[in-house]
Amino acid sequence: MKKWTLLALLSAVLMVLAACGDSEEEAGGGESGEGESYRVGIDTTYPPFEFEEAGEYTGIDIDLINAIAENQGFEIDFNPMDFGGIIPALQADQLDVAIAGMSITDERKEIVDFSDPYFDAGLSLVVAEDNSDITSLEDLEGKTVAVKSGTTGAQFARDNEAEYGYEISQFEDSPSMFQEVSNGNADVLLEDYPVIAYAIAESELALKTVGERLTGDQYGIAVLKGENAELLEKINAGLQELRDSGEYDEILNKYIAE
């Protein structure tokens, strides 16, 4: 009798262990990369691409990366910071991906891998509304040029400083830079055309763009170079599907009137 009781007990234990093993296998077998969460670096002082409204992050970049994440089945956690700190944060493994109106440049390509371009931008000269003295780079000798740290505008200013004879004043965010020119403390600023056009229209800034666009920049979504190829594939796939479905155009039209 004791033998049968012992055998029955052992059989019951084995059945429980087997059931637990099956459950673990089923749970593990469901992993396919979906449901993963990625840390996304943004700069919320950059409307219409990224800004904060009523306590919520919004803008072209925010809507775009949210739509890509939904399309590709992953989660995102926004990490707002100064633009100049975004690439260092990728290098320090504090971020997985960056979307911040970031122009694709050869210099940045040495550190990050970019997605397919998602927006055509370009730098513009911006002066006070009543300024009629500055219409091109040739008018900048002896002037003060305001730029935002870490941007292609700042790089462009440094690259051309000696040729055109101006001084550079750097800022950590766009609103401070805009205010500096509005107040007359700087003569001109360099900013991506869609950003300044939106800022002037929405905030009624006493500024205006002058001359032709200085560059033909394109924006890309960035991950650390050589470290996140799978995520970059998802981003490109999601971006293409948004273009094909028309949702990409809907996002742009929400913030930039044609």
Image (cartoon, helix red, strand yellow):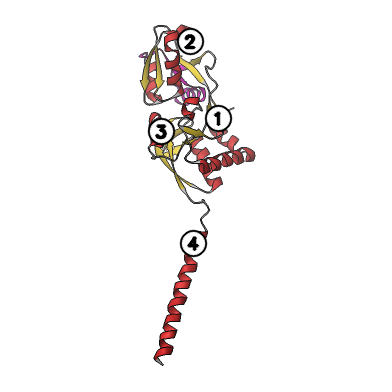
Residue 26 in percent (x, y) is at 51, 63
Disc 2 target residue: 137
Amino acid carrying mark 1 in the image:
Phe
Q: In the drawing, what numbered circle is on residue 27?
A: 4
Disc 3 target residue: 86
Magenta span includes 192: yes
Q: Residue at x 39, y 90 (%)?
A: 2
Disc 1 target residue: 119
Q: Residue at x 47, y 76 (%)?
A: 15
Q: Residue at x 41, y 39 (%)?
A: 95
Amino acid carrying mark 3 in the image:
Ile
C-beta proximity under 8 Å, tags 1 and 3: no
Name the one closer to the observer, 162 or 254: 162
Q: Where 85 falls versus 25 (above or below)?
A: above
- The first of marks 2 and 3 along the sequence is 3
Q: Where 36 falls versus 121 (above or below)?
A: below
Determine if residue 233 is in view: yes
Classify residue 148 as left or right of residue 104.
left
